[in-house]
Image: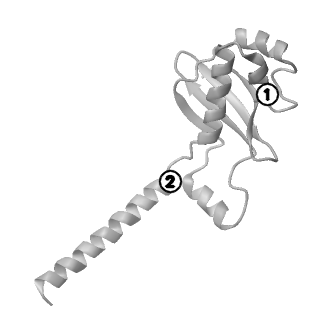
């Protein structure tokens, strides 16, 4: 076997091993729920802008925080609304778990999740997935670590 063929085989094996390790690493990474984060950040920005009617429209009906925009306004003024740094989602779900669910043709997303943010305060936001596939705010508020 020529030196060129040996190098080609070794390069192929290194490539396959590298891609396998990269895939393994990706599948073990926690899923970050980007759509739910986007809805949460939009909701928090609307509250900071005191646009309570529009913020209320992003909430699940019924929800556990407010039954009207007026109650939402009172609640928002008493809460820390700092969603600057995403900390984690619970229940945790890895990218590999999502792939497994998708291959089994099961529902990929959890129906209810909690996103936690940390910066100047700890903020928890619980979201629920509607039958239309949209994330809606179920409750929000500061909490202890």
Horizontally, residue 102 falls left or right of residue 134, namely left
Q: Nearer the viewer, residue 133 or 13?
A: 133
Does residue 68 show up? yes
Does residue 143 show up? no
Colouring convention used in this rendered image of the protein: one colour
Q: CA distance from mark 1 to mark 2?
A: 35 Å
Q: Position of residue 134 (x, y in %)?
A: 74, 42
Q: Position of residue 50 (x, y in %)?
A: 70, 12
* Cβ–Cβ under 8 Å for marks 1 and 2: no
1 or 2: tag closer to the N-terminus: 2
Outermost residue, bottom side? 1
Horizontally, residue 51 falls left or right of residue 32, namely right
Callout 1 crowding tier (Cα within 10 Å): few <14, some 14–19, many ≥20: some
* Element assignment for label 2: helix
Q: Is residue 21 above or below residue 37?
A: below
Reading the image, the residue beneath label 2 is 28
Q: Position of residue 74 (x, y in %)?
A: 78, 9
Q: Which residue is painted at 69% across and 67% down in the image?
A: 104
Reading the image, the residue beneath label 1 is 57
Q: Nearer the viewer, residue 19 or 92?
A: 19
Residue 107's tag is: none
Horizontally, residue 73 falls left or right of residue 122, namely right
Q: Nearer the viewer, residue 67 or 125?
A: 67
The image quadrant where one finds the N terminus is bottom left
Q: In which quarter of the view is residue 52 placed?
A: top right
The image quadrant where one finds the C terminus is top right
Q: In which quarter of the view is residue 21 placed?
A: bottom left
Nearer the viewer's eye, disc 1 or disc 2?
Answer: 1
* Element assignment for label 1: helix
Q: Is residue 75 above or below residue 43?
A: above
């Amino acid at each position: 076997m020529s030196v060129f063929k040996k190098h080609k085989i070794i390069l192929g094996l290194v490539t396959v091993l590298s891609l396998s390790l990269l895939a393994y690493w990706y599948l073990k990474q926690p899923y970050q729920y980007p759509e739910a984060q986007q809805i949460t950040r939009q909701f928090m920005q609307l509250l900071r802008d005191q646009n309570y009617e529009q913020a209320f429209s992003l909430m699940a009906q019924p929800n556990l925080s407010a039954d009207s925009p007026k109650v939402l306004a009172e609640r928002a003024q008493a809460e820390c609304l700092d969603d600057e740094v995403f900390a984690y989602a619970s229940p945790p779900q890895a990218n590999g778990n999502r792939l497994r669910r998708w291959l089994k043709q099961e529902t990929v997303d959890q129906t209810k999740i909690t996103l936690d943010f940390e910066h100047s305060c700890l903020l928890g936001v619980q979201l629920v997935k509607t039958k239309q596939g949209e994330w809606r705010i179920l409750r929000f508020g500061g909490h202890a670590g």
